[in-house]
Image (spheres, grey):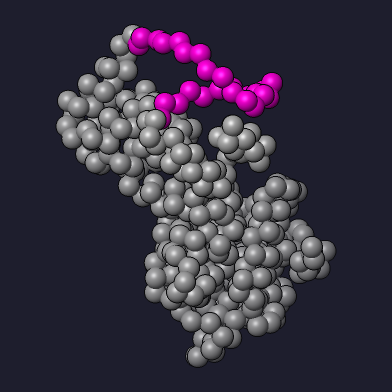
Amino acid sequence: MAKRQKFSISAQQTPVFDDVGAMSATPEKKAGTSISPERLAELQALMAKPAAAASPSDEAQAAKAEERVDTLLPAHHEELIDIDKLVAAPDEWNFFGKPSPEQYALIFQSVYKYGLWHPCTVWEQEDGTYMILGGHTRRMVYQELYEVTKDEKYKKIPCKVYKHDQITEPTARRIVILTNIAQRAKEDSAVRIHCYSEMALLEKEEAFYGSGVDVNTAVAKLFGVSRATVFFYRRLEKLIPELLDAYDQRQITQAVAGMLCDVPQELQQYIYEKGYHLELKPAMRHALKVAVTKEDIDAIIQQQKQPQEKYQYVFSTKIKKPSNFDFVPLAIDHDEVQAFKDFMDQTLDLADNLSDHTKKVIREMLKG
């Protein structure tokens, strides 16, 4: 795997200005800058601190995602572009929001101390400007570094350039999503949902893989995930924000989150307010799906709390159970056994959370 070029801009090349960031008697901006003396002081303090090392896993994920964009949608070329020629993408395209002050500080320190590891991604416009598809924060870092140091090297930033007639607007919007999510690998589920949903809308507007590929499959291929993953997260759009947060905080499982998607949102709110979401079990799926009132929800929870009778059955199998495996009892209508086996065989292909070994054992038992 080829390693991306590091665009080296180091602190050693930058002269030291003893008066940069000095607090003035008035809140007026320092002459020749567009930021306040207070902000200059903050930036100089950041420049004086040792830069925190980025997480290796974060770097690896970002690099892998950027390589994916390069493979799917290769840019025309790379070049240094004046930062004044860069313009932001429309807000409706770039819905990721700004980094926190702490995140921005880490990026600022890293660029100042070690240089820029990933170029910005831009789209050439007819008026001679370049729309930023990926790298709004990096562009801001360069702007502030120039304000602090007045070093001309910060007036131009490395960019991957898409020519104006090379891509369409839907493709440009795809690049915004793919390049930004590459830098936000640990975002919450709401961001993933928004990304997958926006990409699905773009696929309907202009098919990337052609008309023969369904929307969820196309989105899955673009993000490099399974179709089942895309389908699951798009279903999570039906959850109220409180339950989505509960899923992100691991208070409810994927199975429970999935079955809550089938519940009307007014009942979801009731479930959350009563704390019932913490008591739900996958076995309640059918009962929840047909619930229409708050009383129905109360009855389902109360039924779960009742002592349950237990039954014991003896069965035989021709396949030896691996020592670290458990049996999962299931009861299937006698006339539907073969249909169930066919269903399970097809479903196993989409089960990303199961190992190949587990899938193999299940298939052997289904045949036995």
The image quadrant of residue 258 is top left
Question: Is 283 in front, or is 309?
Answer: 309
Give me the residue at 62% from left, 25% from top. Answer: 318
Question: Is 112 in front, or is 216?
Answer: 216
Give me the residue at 67% from left, 24% from top. Answer: 320
Task: Give the position of the N terminus as an image quadrant.
Answer: bottom right
| Dominant secondary structure (helix, strand or loop) of the stretch shown in magenta | loop
Relative to 307, is 164 above or below? below
| Residue 53 highlighted magenta (yes or no) | no
Q: Which percent across, then down, holds residue 2?
A: 80, 66
The mark tally for this picture is: 0
Query: Residue reaching furthest front?
Result: 335
Give me the residue at 39% from left, 74% from top. Answer: 205
Q: Which percent across, then down, holds residue 195?
A: 46, 59
Relative to 204, is 233 above or below? above
- Whether residue 88 is visible to the viewer of this picture, yes or no, is no
The image quadrant of residue 201 is bottom left
Relative to 343, is 175 above or below? below
- Whether residue 7 is visible to the viewer of this picture, yes or no, is yes
Span highlighted in magenta in the image? 308-332
| Residue 327 highlighted magenta (yes or no) | yes
Question: Is 271 in front, or is 157?
Answer: 271
Q: Is residue 54 left or right of residue 305?
A: right
Give me the residue at 42% from left, 26% from top. Answer: 331
Q: Which percent across, then down, holds residue 20?
A: 67, 62
Question: Is 57 in front, or is 309?
Answer: 309
Task: Give the position of the C terminus as an image quadrant.
Answer: top right
Relative to 27, is 359 above or below? above
Q: Which percent across, then down, holds residue 175?
A: 54, 70
